[in-house]
Amino acid sequence: MSDDTSTQSILRTKPVEDVLAQSADEGEEHTGAPSSGKLRRKLGPFDLMGFGVGIVIGTGIFTLTGVEAKQHAGPAVTISFIIAGVVSLLAALCYAEMASSVPAAGSAYTYAYATIGEVFAWIIGWDLILEFALGASVVARGWSGYLANLFHLPSAWFAEDGSVVNVGAILITLVLGVIAAVGIRESARVTNALVLVKVAVCVFVIVAGAFFITKSNLVPFVPHAEPVKQSVSGLKQPLSQAVFGISPSAYGMAGVLTAAAVVFFAYTGFEAVANLGEETKRPKRDLTIGLLGTLALCTVLYIGVSFVVTGMVSYKKIDEGAPIASAFDAVGQGWASTLVSIAAVCGLTSVILVDLVAMGRIGFAMGRDRLLPPAVAKVHPKWGTPYRITIATTIFVAVLAGFVPLAALADLVSIGTLFAFIIVSLAVPVLRRKRPDVHRPFRVPLSPVLPIVSALACLYLMTNLTMETWLRFAVWMVVGMVVYLGYSRRKARLATGEEAEAVTA
């Protein structure tokens, strides 16, 4: 491999056999006993759904519902969630096929390495690190703010604005980082407990709120289109507006589609389930259940909550900061606001924990392939987790969450996720063509049509993000390419011939 041309070397692919050989063999599937340097298989389908719901149900359901109803869609924000759910389903089907066929840590990174080449695998791995790190940091600051409001804590140490050091964000990140490093089983137990609380509260909101729905608040269900009150230009404008001259609309079906592009990001994160392939007892079955089960449950909750909230209070009067709590205040049920705030704290806690777990698995996969220093991929002999990379990423996230106001960078989480979805969608037909012999317990129907539609839908949603977000994403990718060309391309296992030896063994 060392004599390959530059183009050949960066486009080399990792044999599927090697991917499977690196993960636990069939004998380990049911015992959970790890080989040296391998992760432990301790998770079942409900644990995977717990991780999935834990990361998906967060700020989206507690904030985006009100923001998009008021600004773009009105009561039809429910339709926006349905549209976003369908697009997410297309991506989830692609993830399910790849995860069941190649059940290994690293998710989109590993799939790209096995299908379209090393340089794309590096790009997607680098991208996912950014996605999960920024996601955890932003949510940690939001968690701190919710906690301050709930217990009237000093804003100087817990607020998003006005605090030099966000102590609350740092503390929650460090505590959850310890849980993520100590064991996947412990992480699953904490996540499942938090998920039970927030799902129960979401069901409560739907059932209790249904008694306070007023028909007049839902009519017209799709408000008449209106021009956007404040136009944007320069780097603040969406890419679609800058390139095609398409301006965002308020209300009408155009507003519904605009809202769908935004609330889609409430679904992102379910790909974290695919990162747990090497820690799942029966990955070829359970990963599909975990992915599709997560999406189904979250879609039902999103649709139910958005419909009830817009039925309880006029969309023009919704509080964008706390739409659910304010809806109950509006109907004289203020006691429910506290319950919703508690659910929000639980919801954000689980998001941070799953982000930290996912980052550890991506770093583990990249270190094992020598694209990152191999020392980061070391698995703790007792805990069975990639503790070094988990600790390192926890410290990184704690610093970001404590010292950097990340509101302006939050869209980077979305563009990173959509980019990953595109890669995975394209990987499905590529792997089918290159390796038709690979066993696929789950197959995307109507391939390659549905994977291509999934990729195009994600690309369309990316065009709704601002030029500023695209520019920052490009800078991060350039930095990543410098690291790859300067270190990873030469140090990779594929560059040394070690990969072939592993497959033979």
Image (tube, rainbow, N blue to C red):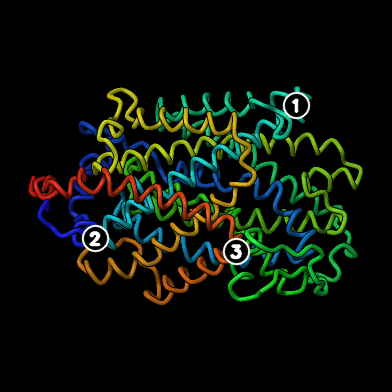
Q: Left of 272 or right of it: where is 14? A: left
Labels 2 and 3 touching (C-beta < 8 A): no
Disc on res. 155 = 1
Q: Secondary structure at mark 2?
A: loop
Between 2 and 171, the one lying in front of the other is 2
- For label 3, count other residues whose C-alpha is less than 10 Å away and answer few (under 14), some (14-19) or many (20+): many
- For label 2, count other residues whose C-alpha is less than 10 Å away and answer few (under 14), some (14-19) or many (20+): some
Q: Left of 499 or right of it: where is 241? A: right
- The quadrant in which residue 430 appears is bottom left
Between 30 and 396, the one lying in front of the other is 396
Q: Left of 172 or right of it: where is 207? A: right
Q: Nearer the viewer, mark 2 or mark 3?
A: 2
Q: Secondary structure at mark 1?
A: helix
Labels 2 and 1 touching (C-beta < 8 A): no
Q: Nearer the viewer, mark 3 or mark 1?
A: 1
Q: Measuring from the top left, give residue 196's x and y in whole percent.
A: 60, 38
Q: CA distance from mark 2 to mark 1?
A: 50 Å
Sequence-earlier tag: 2 or 1: 2
Q: Measuring from the top left, give residue 244's x and y in whole percent.
A: 60, 76
Q: Which residue sits furthest front?
A: 234
Query: Which residue type carries mark 1?
Result: Ser
Q: Which residue is mark 2?
A: 11
Between 276 and 27, the one lying in front of the other is 276
Does residue 337 lie above or below 118 as drawn? above
Query: Which residue type carries mark 2?
Result: Leu
Q: Which residue is mark 3?
A: 84
Does residue 293 lie above or below 498 as drawn? below
Q: Residue at x 26, y 43 (%)?
A: 487
